[in-house]
Image (spheres, grey):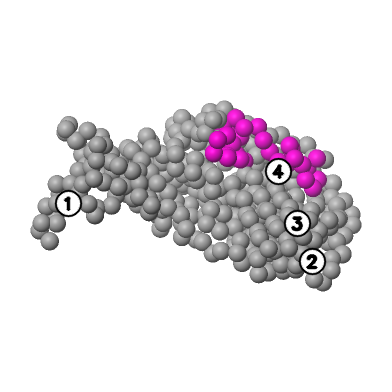
Amino acid sequence: MESLDQDLKSFTLTQDQFVGYDNQGWLSLEEPEGIPVPRNLRRIADDPNKMSTEHFILNLGPCHPSTHGVLREVVELDGENIKSSEAHVGYLHRGIEKLCENSPWTHLAPYMDRADYAGGIYSETALAHAVEELGEIEVPDRAHWLRALMGEVNRMASHFLWLGPLGLDSGAMAPFLYMIWDRETLLEVLESVTGGRLMFNYVRPGGVLNDITPDAEAKLRKWLDIADDRMQEHWDVLMASELFQQRVKGIGVVSHEMAMSMGATGFVGRASGIDWDLRRDRPYGPYSQLDFNVATATEGDIWARIMVRYDEMLNSINIMRQLLDGMPEGPHMAKMPRVLRLPKGEAYGLVEGCRGEIGAHIYSDGGTTPYRVRYRPPIQYHLAIADTVLPGQMLADAIVSLASFDFCFGEVDR
């Protein structure tokens, strides 16, 4: 045991000793043998010949208040500076896509709820679009408008669950509590219509489960009457703070080239200059009949992501008012067979979700259950981007950077 301790104390890894990676992702060393080091992470200082501190390997997560989900981020620290990082996922894997292969076409919505568990309406809608395209199912207009309305309510509730904790991670306690009040009000609307606060099982192939209730409409209109003032309060309390702006401006920069090459969508892509929103550029449902703006920025830092998201929230308020006032009459569900059987083939349904482009790719062999279901999550791509921008930041800044991407690990692991 003493000889082993001496070997470990004398062990240092230099560049000329690095050979490459073995098939299990560990660094291969010429000497000494049998001491694996995690990929991209080294405990030695930049220059062993100069006076410096040993690098420290820190596990952020998977049980950590800053991770916004079951993320394990392994970082190499030189003091408070991050030298390299590596994301470890898989703690929430439930096999959602595989489970779908053993369920009827009309029973897949609950699995989609558990992918983006903060914005389940959009995951359900993406899958419904794919099923309806392959089965040539005509959806009533009112169902399209109800999907859009409940989706925008869900979007706002999800965004409040992002912006409040983002302020919390930067040291602002009060905004989080105020935003949770708004989120609770919107969850009451969703609960009144769908019966659930988190897992909705609301959007079905052919339409939606329930029509909007008088109670839900009254609560939503009451909140919309004060929504603009509430958003101004949130701005004054959090975003207008010079201290908060110093924490987020110029930090966690995602360049336009990185966003394009790594598949960024939604607010992450728009904050880096990608002017793309499926509601406007590939409209579905009633969005082609609505008036709303799509904000973009070029800085690509945390502040740009906040500004793009804040504008998106203001536009969601405007969209909800238009949807309530222009809701068409008619049924909320098409006439569907008791057992749905889709023709052989494949289809791809997509929507602009809370965090970016959500896609559902289905393949049918002509039976009553899917042959294959593939869920396209925006957050999986954003996690790779976040892991790339962490090196070079201070540890405290990295916490806020990770929060700015609004991770939802039901989508990453599935």
The magenta span reads 260-288
Q: In the image, which is nearer the foreground, mark 3 or mark 2?
A: 3
Tell me whether circle 3 and circle 2 mark residues in contact (CB < 8 Å).
no
Q: Quadrant of residue 296?
A: top right
Cα gap from disc 1 to disc 2, whole angstroms: 63 Å
Cα gap from disc 4 to disc 3, whole angstroms: 38 Å
Q: Give the mark, 1 or 2, whose residue is nearer the N terminus.
A: 1
Residue under label 4, please give it. Answer: 317
Mark 3 is surrounded, within 10 Å at the Cα level, by few (under 14), some (14 to 19) or many (20 or more) other residues, namely: few
Mark 4 is surrounded, within 10 Å at the Cα level, by few (under 14), some (14 to 19) or many (20 or more) other residues, namely: many
Q: In the image, which is nearer the foreground, mark 4 or mark 2?
A: 2
Q: Is residue 293 left or right of residue 72?
A: right
Tell me whether circle 4 and circle 1 mark residues in contact (CB < 8 Å).
no
The type of residue carrying mark 4 is: Ile
Q: Secondary structure at mark 4?
A: helix
Q: In the image, which is nearer the foreground, mark 3 or mark 1?
A: 3
Q: Is residue 59 magenta?
A: no
Residue for point 79% across, 47% down: 285
Residue under label 2, please give it. Answer: 341
Q: Which mark is residue 267?
A: none
x and y percent of residue 157 in the render? 62, 51
Q: Secondary structure at mark 2?
A: loop
Tell me whether circle 1 and circle 2 mark residues in contact (CB < 8 Å).
no
233 or 188, nearer to the observer: 188
Residue for point 63% across, 47% down: 354
Mark 1 is surrounded, within 10 Å at the Cα level, by few (under 14), some (14 to 19) or many (20 or more) other residues, namely: few
